[in-house]
Amino acid sequence: MTLAPFGRRLAPLVENRRIGAYQLLIVDDPDGPRDPQPGQFYMLATEERWGAGEGERPYLPRAFSFARAREGRLWFLLEDIGPGTHRLAQVGEGENLWITGPLGIGFDEPAGRPLLVGGGIGAAPLLCLQDQLGPETKVLLGFRSADHAEAANLFAGEPQIATDDGSVGKHALVTELLREELDLRPPTSGLRPTVYSCGPPPMLEAVRALASERGVAAQLALESGMACGFGACFGCVVPTKDGYVRLCVDGPVLDAADLVPGGVGH
Ligand SMILES: Cc1cc2nc3c(=O)[nH]c(=O)nc-3n(C[C@H](O)[C@H](O)[C@H](O)COP(=O)(O)OP(=O)(O)OC[C@H]3O[C@@H](n4cnc5c(N)ncnc54)[C@H](O)[C@@H]3O)c2cc1C
Ligand code: FES
């Protein structure tokens, strides 16, 4: 686990680029750790106009996995789904973001043959994981449409793609690609895979169930609403076999074997 420097810091935005349905933000973070762990996250806010308007209450910072860390720069891939992500998507190059992080616990050092499985914006933390593991690492990605699937071009090699509407790749859910891959190389074949996955809760629940059915290890990067990001508010708790844990400090990456069936999408 890489520890965050104390407090928040200002990071200038050096690039804000559209990648299909998503927005890629690249910030300069010369004072932050160079080696955040894939799966860790940062709390982001804009320096200016972070709130509903003049005289109104400001927003809380929002949580984002880093998608890439290179030469003192951090990449974030955003889906504009609400007021906070909308404002962040509009930040101009040269403007500043407030960043805190890296926070939480990311993916473990890989044991076995890594298999990366992402759904939608959940592709973000798998990008830096592939950077770490090497370009030959197998990646399966599922998206709503071809527009969303443009994010796959950020990966090395040729990730296998599934889309909900069949506009690119296989007309299927990404869990179907995972099932096929596990059929090809069952754990008994000696090439024991470990699944690393991030995506929407129903997808992660399906990955958890499939990994459990096939006896395959899986690490899942979960999401929940995060108000503080450092363990103080208990707003991010998720159920595990050992009781509730705070996703921001005990996760966001959890071992699938520790999760209760149906608990991922609680
Ligand atoms: C550890 C972590 C990593 C994340 N990484 C990324 C990332 O790399 N890229 C990215 O685009 N987003 C990521 N998110 C999600 C991101 O934090 C939310 O999309 C953002 O907070 C939404 O803020 P908003 O003001 O735009 O929308 P809001 O108005 O806050 O939310 C819009 C809608 O989305 C729901 N929602 C908001 N946040 C979450 C959440 N965390 N889980 C489930 N539903 C939610 C709300 O209930 C509401 O229905 C991550 C979240 C976590 C916890
Ligand atoms: S976000 Fe506040 S305790 Fe996790």
Image (cartoon, helix red, strand yellow):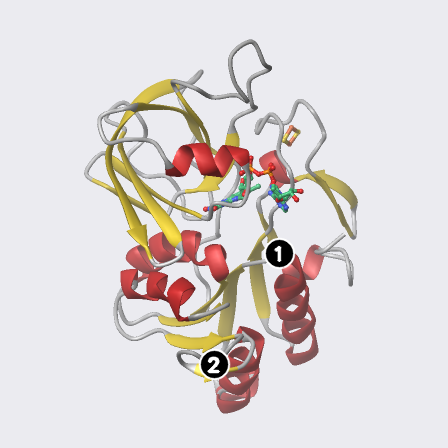
For label 1, the residue is 255
Q: Residues within 10 Å of mark 2 (few under 14, many from 20)?
A: some
Give the residue at x 53% y 34%. 83
Picture coordinates of residue 225, whole percent (x, y): 64, 38
- Which residue is labeled 2 in the image? 166
Q: Is residue 90 left or right of residue 73?
A: right
Image position of 66 (left or right of 120)? left
Left/right of residue 246 with respect to residue 185 in the rendered view? right
Q: Nearer the viewer, residue 250 or 124?
A: 124
Q: Is residue 199 above or below residue 64?
A: below
Identify which residue is drawn at 51% across, 77% down.
Answer: 165
Instruction: Report the residue at 56% width, 81% height from top.
Output: 176
Residue 177 visible here? yes
- In the rendered structure, which amino acid carries the disc numbered 2? Gly
Q: Position of residue 152 (x, y in %)?
A: 34, 65
The secondary structure type at the circle numbered 1 is: strand
